[in-house]
Image (cartoon, rainbow, N blue to C red):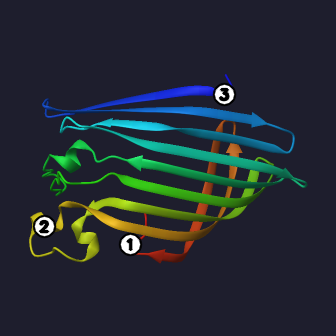
């Protein structure tokens, strides 16, 4: 159907006592023309945390491809979403790979914008593009900041980084095999603020 209303549900349980569930609802509109393909999505993510609280965050994405002569496509995309902390980041100490929980974590907010030019005569393709990413409240272990290294508990505790920003350029080449697409991509940072986004 076009437009379409979509819903995704996720349930997580840890140690049979901590439960968390999420629901993503969004409206999607997409269409194809001889010279243009596009898709727009907008909606909300509901998160029910282990602390008996419910939060709602907005989410949106859009992408478009303009078909130019000589098998060249000009593509652009935009995505804004939120990642809420997981149970293990909020409550559970992980002994296998040291990680100490932090009940005061805030949700991550991500914005990503890309633009690229691709040549695809059929089967084999080549592309070059730019990728901009901005994130607030990234959830990372404290050691990535270079501080809090006086103890294992301090160094490996989950914390929020205030923000991170990166601008990359990249080249890609690959081929399609049926419904599968195989490609190699090489990227290079043009600029970054704070720690790079992984």
Callout 2 secondary element: helix
Q: Which residue is mark 2?
A: 154
Among the 4 quarters of the image, the one containing residue 170: bottom right
Q: Which residue is mark 1?
A: 195
Question: Residue 111's x, y, as percent?
Answer: 50, 57
Callout 3 secondary element: loop
**Is the C terminus in the top left, top right, bottom left or bottom right quadrant?**
bottom left
The residue located at (22%, 50%) in the rendering is 89
Judge whether 41 appears above or below 147 on screen: above
Mark-to-mark CA distance, 3 and 1: 39 Å
Mark-to-mark CA distance, 2 and 1: 19 Å
Badge 3 or badge 2: first in the primary sequence:
3
Question: Residue 125's x, y, as percent?
Answer: 74, 54
- In this rendering, position of residue 197 left or right of residue 113: left
**Is the N terminus in the top left, top right, bottom left or bottom right quadrant?**
top right
The residue located at (59%, 39%) in the rendering is 41
Q: Which residue is mark 3?
A: 3
Callout 1 secondary element: loop
Badge 2 or badge 1: first in the primary sequence:
2
Q: Check contact, mark 3 vs mark 2: CB within 8 A.
A: no
Nearer the observer, disc 3 or disc 1?
Answer: 3
């Amino acid at each position: 159907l076009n437009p379409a209303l979509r819903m995704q549900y996720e349930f997580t349980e840890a140690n049979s006592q901590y439960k968390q569930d999420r629901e993503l609802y969004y409206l999607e509109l997409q269409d194809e023309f001889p010279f243009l393909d596009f898709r727009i999505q907008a909606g909300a993510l509901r998160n029910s945390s282990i602390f008996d609280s419910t939060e709602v965050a907005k989410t949106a994405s859009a992408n478009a491809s303009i078909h130019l002569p000589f098998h060249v496509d000009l593509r652009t995309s935009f995505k804004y979403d939120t990642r809420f902390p997981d149970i293990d980041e909020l409550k559970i100490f992980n002994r296998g790979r040291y990680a100490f929980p932090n009940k005061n974590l805030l949700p991550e907010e991500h914005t990503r914008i890309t633009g690229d030019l691709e040549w695809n005569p059929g089967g084999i393709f080549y592309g070059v593009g730019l990728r901009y990413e901005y994130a607030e409240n990234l959830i990372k272990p404290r050691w990535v900041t270079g501080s809090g290294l006086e103890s294992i508990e301090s160094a490996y505790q989950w914390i929020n980084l205030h923000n991170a920003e990166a601008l990359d350029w990249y080249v890609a080449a690959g081929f399609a095999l049926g419904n599968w697409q195989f490609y190699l991509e090489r990227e290079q940072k043009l600029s970054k603020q704070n720690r790079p986004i992984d």
